[in-house]
Amino acid sequence: MSQEKKKLLIIEDDLGLQKQLRWNFDAYEVLVAGDRESALAHVRRHEPAVVTMDLGLPPDPDGASEGFAILQQILSLAPDTKIIVLSGNQDRENAVKAIGLGAYDFHQKPCDPEMLGLVVERAYYLQALQQDNRRMLQVQAASPMSGVISRDPGMLKVCRNIEKVAPSSASVMLLGNSGTGKEVLARALHQLSPRQDKRFMAINCAAIPENLLESELFGYEKGAFTGAVKQNLGKIELANEGTFFLDEVGDLPMALQAKLLRFLQERVVERIGGHKEIPVDVRIVCATHQNLKELAAAGRFREDLYYRLSEIVINIPPLADRNGDAALLAHHFKNKFNAKEGRPGLNFSQEALALIESHPWPGNVREMENVIKRAVIMADGPQITADDLGLSTATPDEQPINLRQIRDDAEHKAVVKALARVDGNIAKAAELLGISRPTLYDLMNRHAIK
Ligand SMILES: Nc1ncnc2c1ncn2[C@@H]1O[C@H](COP(=O)(O)OP(=O)(O)OP(=O)(O)O)[C@@H](O)[C@H]1O
Ligand SMILES: [Mg+2]
């Protein structure tokens, strides 16, 4: 950030109020305009990020027509400007109408300086976020990490690691929950690798029925089985000299795990019904949302295959753990779908943005993408409201903080657990809990445990 003060334009015809606001905002470079002409001149010349405005301006100081006209002109000159309408007590209706025309917020006169200060600050924050987002989109259009949007240190580290391992031929395992961007990163890895001009072939082990998966992977010769009317190359072979992406590798059936392992050791494939070993050179990238070590311990995933696949392991953090990314991605998807749906200038309301920041996003970036797409389509006005997001606003169960309640809960759980462990034997349960039998009876009574 430069040391220059941020510019704030105040549109107000009352000289007394002009002075008061100027004084309120001495931390900013304040520009003042009393009418349309000077307001628009300031906007053209200084492009202030935030504007506060009175609606009643000459030649219609008692109505709002002039205010509305100026508001619309500013937004058509500089659509990202955040305009805060200062309205009198009686003009709530006009203030709401101003929001409908694209104003960012309204604030009632007489102004509470502290509140207004916060609203203005938040408007700058939002505006900066949007500008950042735009800049990032421009940079990213040219970079191989295209499509990976983040400002979170953890996620940026993931990107750096992808860049680091891309030039090597090591097999890479991407671990992350659904929607965290595993496929996006796998493609970026390929684009950054020396194999970028060759094919990127992907197969989703969870989406293909077991009996088809083998021929998808290894291909088959004509006549290998009923229906094999002509020769068909497998995905591994098709990826020769390129990158082969095994998505949801945790779902690979045991029999195919053995076959894949053999391929990784020998680097040759044999088509089904064929007798030739065909050498194939591919870089392997795989992904899963499952815990493969646990699967291996449970005997559902071959440990030797796990080690072959995981020369480099990259953990992708869930969206909820990425600091600030929710709002950033929301703006990114909003811009994308605004353009697609022909709704330029559509923006988030403050409530919508607050909800986006607090939502846990269990479906990660994919969920975010769907939610914003829907919201852009559903939004009626120039703003996307919290309602348009269609997220449940129910707060997750509040954890009790009352000590008695916590103790009660713990007591109840311990008694139930002890009784279950000894199959209802009172004497043994009392012993486990370290209390006398009468005390246990008391507790069972109190918690209505039979
Ligand atoms: N950091 C990001 N920036 C921008 N878009 C992203 C980012 N991460 C993911 N996406 C987008 O989110 C969607 C889901 O990403 P992707 O398919 O890579 O996730 P995944 O982990 O493979 O999900 P799944 O487990 O559902 O297959 C895609 O449309 C992708 O373009
Ligand atoms: Mg995927």
Image (cartoon, rainbow, N blue to C red):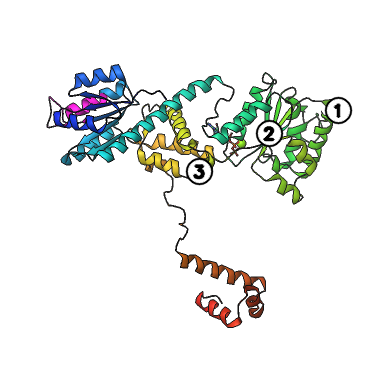
Please report whichever mark, 2 or 3, sits nearer to the chain's N-terminal start: 2
Residue drawn where x is 38% and y is 32% of the image: 126
* Amino acid bearing label 2: Ile
Residue at the spot of label 2: 203
Q: Secondary structure at mark 2?
A: strand
Evaluate if marks 1 and 2 touch, with contact meaning CB atoms under 8 Å apart: no
Q: Residues within 10 Å of mark 1 (few under 14, many from 20)?
A: few
Residue at the spot of label 3: 361
Residue drawn where x is 23% and y is 36% of the image: 95
Q: Secondary structure at mark 3?
A: loop
Residue 445, visible in the rendered structure: yes
Q: Nearer the viewer, residue 40 or 116?
A: 116
Relative horizontal placement of residue 266, taking residue 119 as reference (left or right)? right
Of the 4 image quadrants, the one containing the C terminus is bottom right
Picture disc at residue 277? 1
Q: Nearer the viewer, residue 175 or 86?
A: 86
Magenta segment includes 61: yes
Relative horizontal placement of residue 193, taking residue 405 as reference (left or right)? right
Q: CA distance from mark 2 to mark 3?
A: 26 Å
The picture quadrant where one finds residue 434 is bottom right
Region rendered in magenta: 53-72
Picture disc at residue 110? none
From the top left corner, tell me how far across and down residue 297 is, in percent: 75, 50
Q: Which mark is in front, 3 or 1? A: 3
Please report whichever mark, 3 or 1, sits nearer to the chain's N-terminal start: 1
* Amino acid bearing label 1: Glu
Please report whichever mark, 1 or 2, sits nearer to the chain's N-terminal start: 2
Residue at the farthest right position: 275
Report ligand 1 position as a quadrant.
Answer: top right
Relative horizontal placement of residue 329, taking residue 351 as reference (left or right)? right
Q: CA distance from mark 1 to mark 2?
A: 22 Å
